[in-house]
Image (cartoon, helix red, strand yellow):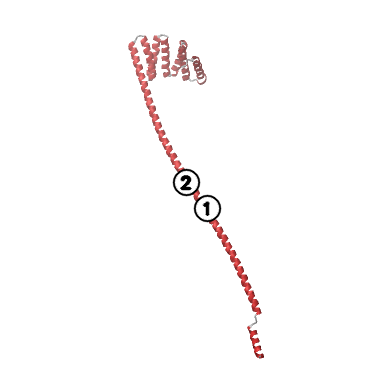
Amino acid sequence: LRHHNYNLALKFFRRNLDIYSAGTGDFWGIGNSFQSIGEVYKKMGKLDSAYNNYSKALEIRQKTGYKLGITGTLNSIAQLYLSKSEINKAESYALNSYSVAKEIGSPQNIRMSAKTLHTVYKRQKKFPKAFLMYEVYVRMTDSIQNEKNKKAIYKQQLNYEFEKKAAVTKADEERKDAIDQEEKHKQQIIIYAVTGGLFLVFLLVIFVFRGYRQKQKANIEIMNQKRVIEVKQKEILDSIRYARRIQLSLMPTEKFILRKVVELRKKI
């Protein structure tokens, strides 16, 4: 509608109307579709078509009791009659819209209806009523603005609380991450220390094992040498004994020598 592509807008809203009517039976959607089609026709200057669609929207909204929609449609019809200069009809619909808006306590709809009535009363030259409706219009405008301000302040407060909680959460997460990193660093140090210790123990075991093997080899060598010496000693002793036996076997006995000496003395 902002680009005045009314035919495309009508096509879109009619498609919505067909969907709501045939598929879901959504009366809220059907009423909104008729209302939107009426708005397009009004902008196109096709006031009769606009009125027909407004009337259908009003009928559906009255059946469903959708008062917020009723006050809006009544005001749209009042403005339609204003554009046709049918002031009395415009006043009647605008008053009905204003009454329903007050009943449901909708500042936006009260403001909208009051503005329409202000225009109606000016054209009727009922200036006190026009001034009264203008006051209502201004008051509702201030109320809506205050409400917007309250919502804006509340939104800012929510944003502040959210950002505050987010900051606390982020700080907690960063603290937890720092603790996790510190724990990981400690674990890495422990792993490195244990690994280094095990490696040193492994080297010590290898050194001790090599020393043990070397000592074992030395002991074996000593034992072998001892056996060789013992064998040599035994061979030497055996040789000495054998030689002595030979020597003793060759030497004359003491009795033999004495006997020979006696025999020699006799011969002399």
**Residue at the location (36% across, 13% down)?**
118
Image coordinates of residue 262 in percent, x first then y, are 64, 88
Residue at which label 1 appears: 203
Q: Label 1: few (<14), some or many (≥20) within 10 Å?
A: few
The image shows residue 255 at horizontal and vertical percentages of 64, 84
Label 2 packing within 10 angstroms: few (<14), some (14-19), many (20+): few
Q: In the drawing, does residue 47 fall left or right of residue 226?
A: left
- Name the element at disc 1: helix
Residue 229 seen anywhere in this rendered image of the structure? yes
Query: For mark 2, what is the residue?
Result: 189
Residue at left 66%, top 88%?
Answer: 264
Residue 256 relative to residue 22: left or right: right
Visible residue check, residue 95: no
Hey, which quadrant is residue 216 in on the image?
A: bottom right
Question: In x, y percent, where is residue 163?
Answer: 40, 31
Q: Nearer the viewer, residue 17 or 36?
A: 36
Query: Which is nearer the eye, 33 or 119?
Result: 119
The residue type indicated by label 2 comes to Ile
Kindly identify which numbered label has been placed on residue 15.
none
Identity of the residue drawn at 40% across and 29% down? 159
Q: In the rendered view, tell whether residue 20 sits above or below residue 245.
A: above
- 41 left or right of 249? left
Dot 1 or dot 2: first in sequence order is 2
Q: CA distance from mark 1 to mark 2?
A: 21 Å
Q: Nearer the viewer, residue 64 or 127?
A: 127
Is 9 or 163 nearer to us in this picture?
Answer: 163
Pinpoint residue 81: horizontal percent, then vertical percent: 42, 10
What is the total number of numbered labels drawn onto the structure image?
Answer: 2
Residue kind at label 1, given as amino acid type: Leu
At 41% from the left edge and 34% from the top edge, which residue is drawn? 167
Secondary structure beneath label 2: helix
